[in-house]
Amino acid sequence: MPLVINIRSDFIRLKHTLTELEQRQLPFAMARALTNTAKHARIDMQGEMRRVFDRPLPWTINSLRIEPATKRDLQANIHFKDFAPKGTAAGRFLRPQIEGGSRELKRSERRLQAVDVMQQGTFLVPRSGARLDAHGNLNRGQMVKVLSNVRALGDQSMGASGGKARGKLRGERYFAVRAGSNRNAHLKPGIYHAVSRTKLRPIYGFVRAATYTQRLDFFGFAERAYARDMPELMREAMEFAMRTAQR
């Protein structure tokens, strides 16, 4: 299920205290106030993501979407974009950080498991030889070379240039050590870079699923923003509605 926050208010109690003109403008003002409250909550969440996550991508920070309230539907929704043309949608990979539990498999992990390089129920973790980007994520180019070397790339390329990845690009050779394998039994399960005949560099390790604790109070931010900001935003929205009303 998608991660969605719903912000709504019961304005029935307000109607009996308003003039006839104010009552006519109330749905417009309420929709405006609810939408602005959702925007405040989104800003709070973005700030918290920058605080609790290590160098989050701008794409992750900007993945929160608001569905504004309308006069006929007095509720504003906040949710993560549920589509990612390349990779995993933010709502899916952030769910363990919001609800706790284990994360979903990445596309590269699914490929490695499909060719029996990795066991089911295991995940990739970077080791000393892994190349990381500026945000601490696995380097895409190195991953393409790994998948090509262990024949897990299939017919689809993950290359940034859009072309098919070649197996031993620039002479780099990678190989996998599967858990329980008799070959290279002295090595820990994972992916290795054969720098030379005598030198191996560990790139990724294979580990069992890690359990995450909640780090981002996704739902709490909406509640706090509503309690803190909604009264003032409602007052401002009503004033705006009355100024622009067609009498």
Image (cartoon, helix red, strand yellow):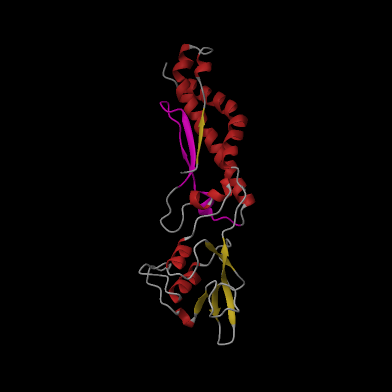
Determine which quarter of the picture holds residue 86: bottom left
As drawn, the residue found furthest toward the bottom would be: 197
Residue 95 location in percent, x, y? 53, 48
As drawn, the residue found furthest toward the right would be: 51
Q: Is residue 76 magenta?
A: yes
In the image, which residues are magenta? 55-81
Task: Tell which of 114 and 124 is nearer to you.
Answer: 114
Quadrant holding the C terminus: top left
Task: Tell which of 1 and 116 is nearer to you.
Answer: 116
Q: Is residue 166 above or below residue 83?
A: below
Determine which quarter of the picture holds residue 211: bottom right
The answer to whether 71 appears left or right of 127 in the picture is left
> Residue at the spot x=58%, y=43% of the render?
45
Task: Tell which of 167 and 64 is nearer to you.
Answer: 167
Residue 126 location in percent, x, y? 58, 67
Count all numbered tags in the image, as a single digit: 0
As drawn, the residue found furthest toward the left would be: 155
Task: Tell which of 19 and 151 is nearer to you.
Answer: 151
Q: Is residue 236 above or below residue 212?
A: above
Determine which quarter of the picture holds residue 217: top right
> Residue at the spot x=55%, y=41% of the render?
42
The answer to whether 224 appears left or right of 148 in the picture is right
Q: Is residue 32 magenta?
A: no
Residue 229 location in percent, x, y? 60, 31
Residue 128 location in percent, x, y? 62, 72
> Residue at the spot x=53%, y=16% of the render?
13
